[in-house]
Amino acid sequence: MSKQSKLELEKAAIKNYLLPFLNLHKQHPFLPGAQNIKGQSAFIGIEESELGEFRQGYQKVCKTAALDLLKEDEVIENISKLPFNSTDAVMVVGDSHADDLQGWFEIFRHLLEIGVDDASFKVLNNAVYGSTSVDVLRRIDRDLSLAKPEWVIIALGSHDAQMLHGIGDRSLVSLAEFYENISTIESMIQEVTPNPIIWVTPPPAVTELMEDMPMFSGVLYEKKLAPYREVMAGKSGYVVDPMGKRMGRPAEAWNYLPDGFHLSLSGHIETVKWLLRALTSEQK
């Protein structure tokens, strides 16, 4: 393969797969160039105008998904019963499932903006692609200090539980360490807000698809992931999908991107529905 052909393939992979996760202002918060679209496009290797068009397209997709959801009676009813006050700050911290610019949290943002009358929510997406509980633990104090949120959503576990190639039968972050990290994160949030934490458990992966994806250095097995989900499901607060059922049992491929790990639009929409159900249930 020629150097030019390889470059074209890499750019295609960025545009068709990675771009919704390349939110450099969060990955590199202290680099001035990462805080504007000109610097971001130069780093990524595409034109500034093209990056802007892609991002506008992602927001259009999320807004359209929110409008479609607001045609459903269950969604309308649950929106009306949300426990938020109209000026609350709602912040998510976590991994690439929430960081996705076409993801469930961005759809949820539009639902709040469109579906709640006279509301002026402050909706903050502080999730970062590829994060483990270690990464969130490192950032959480700064995030809480800057945002002072009334509500915090935690979406973690998928990257912690990945089994890396060539290192034997162990996960990236051990279950014991994950438990300690989550407990510390929980304590830090409870010092800032009296409201219950919202826990979004990690969805299963389609392992066979993940094994065929060259961009992953590891793989995720449901039998390894389930205990991480159980750690989050055992916490007090609102728990979204404690049994990992929202993608189907077994997980249905159309709810995922071709990598079998990240969610497709349908998978993100299911997550929003489960989030609304959890927030309007009696559990706390």
Image (cartoon, helix red, strand yellow):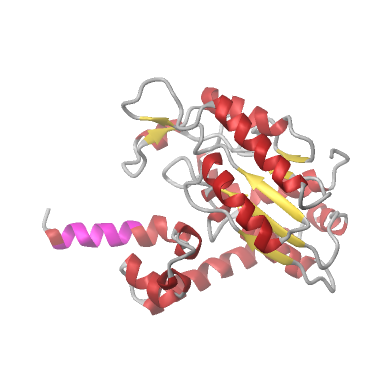
Find residue 185 and report its image quarter.
Answer: top right
The quadrant in which the C terminus is found is top right
Q: How many circles with numbers are drawn on the protein? A: 0
Predominant secondary structure, magenta span: helix
Point out residue 76 in the picture as x, y percentages from the top left corner: 82, 58
Find residue 86 and report its image quarter.
Answer: bottom right
Q: Residue furthest left?
A: 2
Q: Residue furthest top?
A: 169
**In the shown orientation, is residue 188 left or right of residue 99?**
right
Point out residue 91 in the picture as x, y percentages from the top left corner: 68, 57
| Residue 66 visible | no
Report if residue 231 lies within the magenta region: no
| Residue 186 visible | yes
Q: Nearer the viewer, residue 139 or 126?
A: 139
Point out residue 65 in the picture as x, y percentages from the top left corner: 64, 61
**In the shown orientation, is residue 7 left or right of residue 109?**
left
**In the shown orientation, is residue 158 left or right of residue 123?**
left
Report if residue 7 lies within the magenta region: yes
User: Which residue is depicted at the point 49% across and 32% down?
Assistant: 173
Point out residue 26 in the picture as x, y percentages from the top left corner: 51, 61
Q: Nearer the viewer, residue 273 or 153?
A: 153
User: Which residue is depicted at the point 66% across and 63% down?
Assistant: 146
User: Which residue is depicted at the point 72% across and 67% down?
Assistant: 122
The range drawn in magenta is: 4-13
In this view, 23 is above or below 223: below
